[in-house]
Amino acid sequence: SYQEMLNLNVIATPVKQSSFENGVQTSAMRTEFERKNNMILPTSIYLINTDGSEEKRLTYHAYDDRGNPVEFSKDGGQHHAVLWNELGTLPLAKVTNASANQIFHTSFEHLLIVTNQGAHSGNRFITDYSLNLPDLPSGEYVLSYWKKVGNEWQPHKETITVGSNGFDRSF
């Protein structure tokens, strides 16, 4: 809320922005905020029309623990989910028509595993890997990964159907 922002001395974050031409307001927008993950984060953005009426244009549905938006939608539009890198500094992908709990990415480059110059990316690979996602919503998903066959890395892509028990697979 705006009062909580003032109480926390959050004064550099714009709440309302207006543009003027020759002293006449040409456009304006207002952002609503909420405390999430112990941070003050935007929840909705409104366009303010010249007659003072407002139209909701964007809703932020979910954030990660670093304050990065992981799910948003335009008013009346499709949801978009965003994957961020492990440091939370760069977006890896935006998926249209998906919620944050419907997309997943993992990497094992940070694990203490086999180091080898023959790895497909970086210089590490893993020989036995299990992926367990018990809360993955039911539906169809695309699973893709690289697999070494003989001396050659080959991309693998398959459509999987997830039921009420989530997803569990060993590679």
Image (cartoon, rainbow, N blue to C red):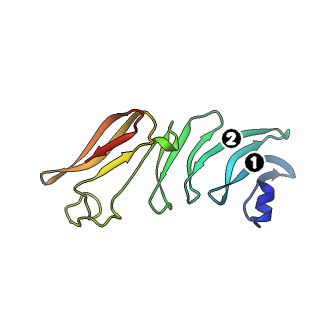
Residue drawn at x 36%, y 56% as measured from the top left: 107
Circle 2 crowding by C-alpha within 10 Å: few under 14, some 14–19, many from 20: some
| Viewer-proximal residue among 17 and 169 | 169
Residue behind mark 2 = 57
Residue 104, position in %: x, y? 42, 47
| Viewer-proximal residue among 33 and 49 | 33
Residue drawn at x 87%, y 52% as measured from the top left: 23
| Viewer-proximal residue among 78 and 105 | 105
Which kind of residue does numbered mark 2 sit on? Answer: Arg
Q: Is residue 138 left or right of residue 50?
A: left
- Disc sitting over residue 119 in the figure: none
- Indicate the secondary structure of the residue bearing disc 2: strand
Q: How many marks?
A: 2
Circle 1 crowding by C-alpha within 10 Å: few under 14, some 14–19, many from 20: some
Q: Is residue 11 left or right of residue 165?
A: right
- Indicate the secondary structure of the residue bearing disc 1: strand
Q: Which residue ends up furthest to the right in the rendered image?
A: 23
Q: Which residue ends up furthest to the front in the rendered image?
A: 165
| Viewer-proximal residue among 166 and 127 | 166
Marks 2 and 1 sit apart, C-alpha to C-alpha, by 9 Å
Q: Earlier in the sequence, mark 2 or mark 1?
A: 1
Residue behind mark 1 = 29
Check the image and report above or below for 54 versus 30. above
Asked whether disc 2 touches disc 1, contact meaning CB atoms under 8 Å apart, the reply is: yes
Residue 33, position in %: x, y? 72, 52
Check the image and report above or below for 141 versus 38. above
Which kind of residue does numbered mark 1 sit on? Answer: Met
- The answer to which image quadrant residue 59 occupies is top right
Residue drawn at x 81%, y 52% as measured from the top left: 20
Residue 10, position in %: x, y? 74, 64
Check the image and report above or below for 14 versus 136. below
